[in-house]
Amino acid sequence: MKKLLSTLGFCISVGWFATASVGEQTMLDTFDNNPQSRWEFLADTVMGGVSNGKVSYSQENGSAYARLTGTVSTQNRGGFIQFRSELEEKLPDNAKGIRLVARGNNQMYFVHLRTSGTLLPWQYYQGSFDATQDWTEVRIPFSAFKASGRMLRSEPRPTQVNSIAVVAFGRDHQALVDVQEIGFY
């Protein structure tokens, strides 16, 4: 966090997140300072699926990151593993989308958002991104998030987002995705 603070210039505390602003982007997490207390691993086993995996936290070249690994299986109507965090503070109304710095095994992964309107466990908004082998900044505008059903608004409202998840989803595959930073812009 000290490296982040000196690089960014200033930091404010919002809920459990150490939020740092740079220009038009705001950091929600950089996966240092006890991230396991903020993020939880979930798999489709909560609904009878057979996918398995884990989230772990590491450092490389002085930067912390979260790593999601596992086997995603669509057997038993399953098909996901994820790591998720509840937001204690709402995003600002003028937020345009989710920003993350990620790398992986050259596959597509997803960010799932839950809002005050996603009441049922299977409701969410989904935005996709490709995780290449190199660290890459990814920006997913809220307009690119798709609702999981017709009962939801077509686009999530930033002020209603209450959780965020990084997800391996929807097909049989081996997951490997690292996230170094996650926030909004």
Image (cartoon, grey):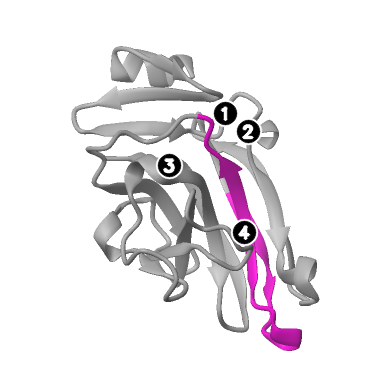
Q: Which residues are magenta?
A: 67-88
Q: Residue at x 34, y 48 (%)?
A: 98
Q: Which mark is residue 82?
A: 4
Q: Which quadrant of the view contains residue 144?
A: bottom left
Alpha-carbon neighbours of circle 4 within 10 Å: few (<14), some, or many (≥20)?
Answer: many
Residue 172 position, x and y percent, is 62, 83
Instruction: Give the amino acid at mark 3.
Output: Ile
Residue type of the residue flagged with mark 1:
Asp
The kind of secondary structure element at disc 3 is strand
Q: Secondary structure at mark 1?
A: loop
Task: Classify residue 176 by image quadrant.
Answer: bottom right
Task: Give how far apart the Cα atoms at labels 4 and 1 are.
Answer: 19 Å
Q: Nearer the viewer, mark 4 or mark 1?
A: 4
Mark sitting earlier along the chain (4/1): 1
Real-space Cα separation, disc 4 to disc 2, in angstroms: 15 Å
Report if residue 179 lies within the magenta region: no
User: Which residue carries the number 2 mark?
Assistant: 35
Above or below for 154 versus 36: below
Q: Which residue is mark 3?
A: 182
Dot 1, how many residues are within 10 Å of its Cα: few (below 14), some (14-19), or many (20+)? some
Q: Which mark is residue 32?
A: 1
Q: Residue at x 63, y 70 (%)?
A: 80
Q: Earlier in the sequence, mark 2 or mark 3?
A: 2
How far is mark 1 from mark 3, CA to CA? Answer: 12 Å
Judge left or right: residue 117 versus residue 156.
Answer: right
Residue 48: tell me if it is visible. Answer: yes
Q: Residue at x 40, y 21 (%)?
A: 4
Q: Is residue 170 left or right of residue 94?
A: right
